[in-house]
Image (cartoon, grey):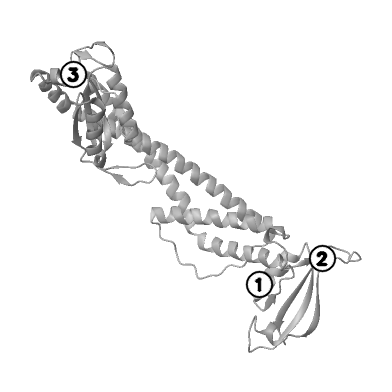
Amino acid sequence: MVNLQCFSQCSEADMSKLLRSEEMTLVQIFLSQEASYNCIRELGELGAVQFADLNEGVNAFSRNYVSEIRRSEEMERRLRFFAGEIEREKLPVPADYNVPSAPNPKDLIDLEATLEQLEGETRQINANQEALLRNFYELKELKHVLNSASTFFQEGAAIQQEGLKERLTPKYDEESGGNISRHLSFLCGVINRAKIPVFERVLWRASRGKALLRHMEIEEVLKDPATEEEIPKSTFIVYFQGEQLKMRVKKICEGLGATTYPCKEDWEERRQTEAEVDKRLEELTSILNETKNHRFRMLNTVVSSINSWIIQVRKVKAIWYTMNKFKKDRDRTAPTRRLVSQAATKRS
């Protein structure tokens, strides 16, 4: 139910709020709370009314429809999330020249539920894909470590043949207070190529020259599973002696973001491990392709409707902002709860 009361012709100051060249009429509108949304929706589509704020002294967080505005902002956030995902996949968004009207209350509830469901599914797919990619690149790095191991171990044999083992480690360990084993230990892994110089300096200082680093560039460019940013990396091996030095090397690797991988000295064991890695990589590639296809299909359903959804959500938010300008009718004799508003419209 809508009641209109015409007050008078607007003053020049009131007319300037809409159109200076039009003669305006100030009206008072009484709206039933149940029908207020639909009424403002229709008036908004006409675009012929400007509402005055009857709650200028009321804090924005104390108005009647704050929760509805927050729900609209949550839908906007979801649409921004979808826009970012579409841009990330570089999907073309078809031009839509049809301007949809604001949804009715039932369609609004359906739209909110649809956006919530699509966001939940998309985030779940993204999380699964990121975990799969992290596992995939870890296996790739392990494969490169295994491939580089032969060269590293040949250099290690040369180190011992040239007698460098005696130079790397003294016969008496001052920190442990006793004699140490003559067997060289090693640690293999992968590190960001840009951090190699820092890695070398820190290792030299922490080990007092008792640790030896060898590294080899990885020709294949690996990616960060979270951002998919390409990161050039290198495989490395660190030769050292003693458990204390081993702990130091591990802490240095952790501090510089290097990833260590188990690697056997025996060639046959490395060959078996590499075969297992190749099998797991093949399985992961198949699963990743299925996940990407599923994500692509889901985003395609969003692409066809995202422009329409953005316009609808903006209109809904504008309706709630407008209704926050209204006051509740204090007339207790009214049959239903009503809202009171004042508006300026073109004089007919």
Element class at badge 2: strand
Residue 95 in the image: state x and y as whole percent: 46, 67
Residue for badge 3: 169
Circle 2 Cα neighbour tier, 10 Å, few/some/many (<14 / 14–19 / ≥20): many
Is residue 330 rendered to the left or right of residue 18? right
Toward the viewer: 316 or 182? 182
Spatial CA span between label 2 and label 1: 19 Å
Res 243 visible: yes
Which of the two discs, 2 and 3, sits closer to the camera?
3
Spatial CA span between label 1 and label 3: 83 Å
Residue for badge 1: 44
Quadrant for the N terminus, please. Answer: bottom right
Is residue 109 rendered to the left or right of residue 217? right
Residue 53 in the image: state x and y as whole percent: 71, 71
Residue 104 circle label? none
Toward the viewer: 36 or 253? 253
Query: Residue 52 appears in which quarter of the rendering?
Result: bottom right
Circle 1 Cα neighbour tier, 10 Å, few/some/many (<14 / 14–19 / ≥20): some
Query: Residue 35 appears in which quarter of the rendering?
Result: bottom right
Residue 5 in the image: state x and y as whole percent: 81, 79
- Residue at image position (64%, 76%) is 47
Q: Residue furthest top?
A: 178
> Is residue 191 shown above or below 48?
above
Residue for badge 2: 338
Res 282 visible: no
- Mark toward the start of the polypeptide (2 vs 3): 3
